[in-house]
Image (tube, rainbow, N blue to C red):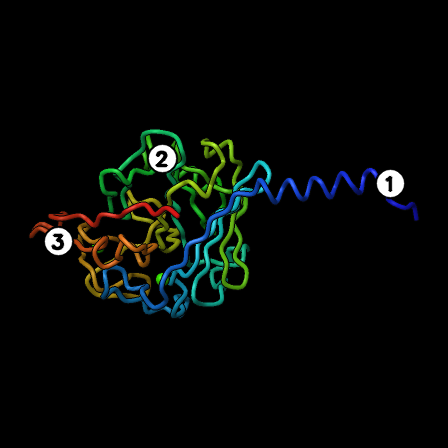
Amino acid sequence: MKKPHPLRAIGLATLLAFGAAASHAVEFTDPRGDDKGPGNYTYPTDGAYKAGSFDLVKFSAVKSGNNVDFAVDVNSTLEDPWGMGVGFAVQMVFIFVKTGAPGGYTATFPGLNVQFAPGHEWNKLVVLSPQKKARVTGEADAKLGAMAKDVVVPNLTRGRSRTISGSVPLAELGGDGNVDGWSYQVVMQSNEGFPAGTDFLTRKVNEYEGQHRWGGGNDGDCDPHVMDVLEGPDAKQSEMLAYECAPDGKAKKMATLKMLKK
Ligand SMILES: [Ca+2]
Ligand SMILES: [Ca+2]
């Protein structure tokens, strides 16, 4: 076997040292046991929705070369009861990102029933779904209007152990790549293969839970269809997800999220 060329070995060491010095990464943790939306939501009754499997406990974004690797941990081992073929099936994670670029949205889209507070705009949405990328981008194009151009979907999203992860090109996120300087919010939803007409592959929350419906909310679309979000020092989940319904089932006060920054 040929010995490595000494210069090449030095080159690699230098590259590794440079890589470490230039690395950008950010990690957030979230409390366990708060996978109850505003506080009282209940899981669907079907056995596929295992206890803790929608409890967000950790989120990270790591710049890796020309990509950004996103990972979300839940409080239960992932399973694939619906044969999606990627190591998980029931979860769908929305990662709202504010890169260094100006502008953005406070609104979200049908099926979540949440908005963001003024000053907490997002400008990119990374979707981690067990559905094929073409299905997710097709649904976004059909249902999200102008926001669809800011939806970023990994070529492949995987579940392994307790971690759902996917990687996207930095160029699709834009911004400077300083992921540790960006703001984030993470919304835990459920992969609904047969969504309502306007909903973006999301599962509904009703007053009473059903085999494939969350309970503890409202049969209308005034309640946040959200199981867990990232909590921060100035961003309490129970306050962000507080909502009020009008008698006609429309939102009187819509749940209002904040972006978090390290
Ligand atoms: Ca949690
Ligand atoms: Ca509802």
Which residue is pictured at 45% across the width and 49% down the height?
129
Q: Which residue, given by chain and number where applicable, does mark 3 sit on?
A: 244
Say if 59 sits above or below 171 in the image: below
Which class describes the residues within 10 Å of circle 1: few (<14), some (14-19), or many (20+)?
few
Q: Residue furthest left?
A: 247
> In the image, which is nearer the foreground, mark 1 or mark 3?
1
> Residue 77: which disc?
none
| Mark 1 or mark 2: whose residue is earlier in sequence | 1
Amino acid at pointer 1: His
Residue 261 coordinates in the image, percent (x, y):
37, 46
> Residue 123: which disc?
2
Residue 186 coordinates in the image, percent (x, y):
37, 50
Amino acid at pointer 2: Asn
Q: Is mark 3 within 8 Å of ligand 2?
A: no
Q: Secondary structure at mark 1?
A: loop
- Distance between the alpha carbons at the discs numbered 1 and 3: 69 Å
Q: Which residue, given by chain and number where applicable, does mark 1 sit on?
A: 5
- Distance between the alpha carbons at the discs numbered 1 and 2: 47 Å
| Mark 1 or mark 3: whose residue is earlier in sequence | 1
Residue 133 coordinates in the image, percent (x, y):
49, 42
Which residue is pictured at 30% across the width and 55% down the height?
233
Say if 44 sits above or below 201 in the image: below
Quadrant hosting ligand 2: bottom left
